[in-house]
């Protein structure tokens, strides 16, 4: 990055800017290297400007600051080539990210939704990579900082930049969208995740549809069809709505799905109707980008799941399905329903779902009611729940054996002491429940 690139920051005061080449932008002194440019970010519990001196000692040759005194302190320091005074370091970082996107000349695909956005991101990437040089958000780096990091990590030859957008409240997706200027914007669904923060599903819809405010005029909005998505879509250009009613599933079993969508046949190396829904967003993205159906088919067949998202693993006599990366009422019903549809007599190990607000108990009860009324439940099904909230799931189940545990250690011990309980173990909970520790304990004690 040339120092002249920093001129893309608006509302700034350049204290010093010698013409040099920076290795990269760094926001963390723990990973800073000689020749980096340091952007000190701020949070509720940290202030990166407190570490400017440390960044310089570690080799940073330039930095942003909101403090005039700090700027003047290092103005004559020969170790420093660039000092820029800004009002907000994060907004400055995002302005640079926008400039970097323009420099790359790539098209941005923005993906958000109450559930399924990471899986959809991986499917869109798998599809786009068949024709373009694509780059995607890593892991769950889906906030403003993660957006900027993704942009600057993208290779110089990136043609399609796939950005996952998470949300904690109103205005956050709009902010990222403003600087991303997506060519394709996708909403996987509008459910009840984060309802504890936003108060209603309508507010969630408003927040998710913020992604439509900055779509490029010749771009497209792709969304899982719902009245809320249509109501709050502010994009005046092309929109494509889809649903499972558009799909005819031809074949489905463990690790495979074949279906027809708009007269064309596609395959997925994974089961689950909700995964079919996610793939439709990827199909429509590929079609809009000018890809052939054949290339899209090939991309979907190459899709791979990521850690803790429907990973199937054989451990001893068990088949373990780990989908414990995250959970909300919509994704819980979708995945649990899929397990009950696909397997006879599974063991469902379910944990608390977070961020559901004052109605948390009600949402957990609804999961119990959903399981208890499922047509495939039988007396041989087992439901093990972990956590105080998940007790509400067990309380609604009377058609099969169920048991609640206070913590994951108790649940792991029970499974290991009752090895004949069942050989299909399905794990689903919010990330904070750390269900991978149950799985690791099983791995450690079963050969």
Image: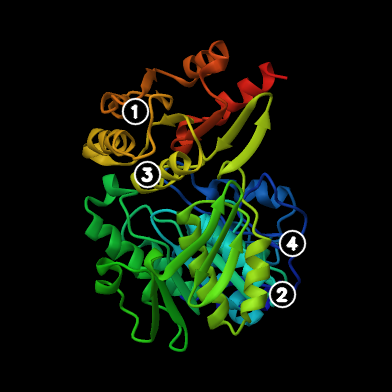
What residue is rendered at 60% in x and 63% in y? Answer: 267
What residue is rendered at 69% in x and 77% in y? Answer: 131
* Residue 56 image point, x, y percent: 69, 52
Which label is found at residue 390?
1
Q: Is residue 356 left or right of residue 83?
A: left
Is residue 38 shown above or below 446?
below
**Label 3 crowd bin: few (<14), some (14–19), many (20+), radius 10 Å:** some
Q: Report which residue position mark 4 lands on.
A: 78
Give the alpha-carbon distance from disc 1 to disc 2, as whole Å. Answer: 53 Å
Q: Are marks 4 and 1 in contact (CB under 8 Å)?
A: no
Visible in this render: residue 72?
A: no
**Label 2 crowd bin: few (<14), some (14–19), many (20+), radius 10 Å:** few
| The C terminus lies in quadrant | top right
* Residue 152 image point, x, y percent: 64, 66
Q: Is residue 126 left or right of residue 171?
A: right
Give the alpha-carbon distance from disc 3 to disc 1, as whole Å. Answer: 14 Å
Q: Report which residue position mark 2 lands on.
A: 2
Give the alpha-carbon distance from disc 4 to disc 1, as whole Å. Answer: 60 Å
Is residue 398 shown above or below 1?
above
Which label is found at residue 333?
3
**Label 4 crowd bin: few (<14), some (14–19), many (20+), radius 10 Å:** few
């Amino acid at each position: 990055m040339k120092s002249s690139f920093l001129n893309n920051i608006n509302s700034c005061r350049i204290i010093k800017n010698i013409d040099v080449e920076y290795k990269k932008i760094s926001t963390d002194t723990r990973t800073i290297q000689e020749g980096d440019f340091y952007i000190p970010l701020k949070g509720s519990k940290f202030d990166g400007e407190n570490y400017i001196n440390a960044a310089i000692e570690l080799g940073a040759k330039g930095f942003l600051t909101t403090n005039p005194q700090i700027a003047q302190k290092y103005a004559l320091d020969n170790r420093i080539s660039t000092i820029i005074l800004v009002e907000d370091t994060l907004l400055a970082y995002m302005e640079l990210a926008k400039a970097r996107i323009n420099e790359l000349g790539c098209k941005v695909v923005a993906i958000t939704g109450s559930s399924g956005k990471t899986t959809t991101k991986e499917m869109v990437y798998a599809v786009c990579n068949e024709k373009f040089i694509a780059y995607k958000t890593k892991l769950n780096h889906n906030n403003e900082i993660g957006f900027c990091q993704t942009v600057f990590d993208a290779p110089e030859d990136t043609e399609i930049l796939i950005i996952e957008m998470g949300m904690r409240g109103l205005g956050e997706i709009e902010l990222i969208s403003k600087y991303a200027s997506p060519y394709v914007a996708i909403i996987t669904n509008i459910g009840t995740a984060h309802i504890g923060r936003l108060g209603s599903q309508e507010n969630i819809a408003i927040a998710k549809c913020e992604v439509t405010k900055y779509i490029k005029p010749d771009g497209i909005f792709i969304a899982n069809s719902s009245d809320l998505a249509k109501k709050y879509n502010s994009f005046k250009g092309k929109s494509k709505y889809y649903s499972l009613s558009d799909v005819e599933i031809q074949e489905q079993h463990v690790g495979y799905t074949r279906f027809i969508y708009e007269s064309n046949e596609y395959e997925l190396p994974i089961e689950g109707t909700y995964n079919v829904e996610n793939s439709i967003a990827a199909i429509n993205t590929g079609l809009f980008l000018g890809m052939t159906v054949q290339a899209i088919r090939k991309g979907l067949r190459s899709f791979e799941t990521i850690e803790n998202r429907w990973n199937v693993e054989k451990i001893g006599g068990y088949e373990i399905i780990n989908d414990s990366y995250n959970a909300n009422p919509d994704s819980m019903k979708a995945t649990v329903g899929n397990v009950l549809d696909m397997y006879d007599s599974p063991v469902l190990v379910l944990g608390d779902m977070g961020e559901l607000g004052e109605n948390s108990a009600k949402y957990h009860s609804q999961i119990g009611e959903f399981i208890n009324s499922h047509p495939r439940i039988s007396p041989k099904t087992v439901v093990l729940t972990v956590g105080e909230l998940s007790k509400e799931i067990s309380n609604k189940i009377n058609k099969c054996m169920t048991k609640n545990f206070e913590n994951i250690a108790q649940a792991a011990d029970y499974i290991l002491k009752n090895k004949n309980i069942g050989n299909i173990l399905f794990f689903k909970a919010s990330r904070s429940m750390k269900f991978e520790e149950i799985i690791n304990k099983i791995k450690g004690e079963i050969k």
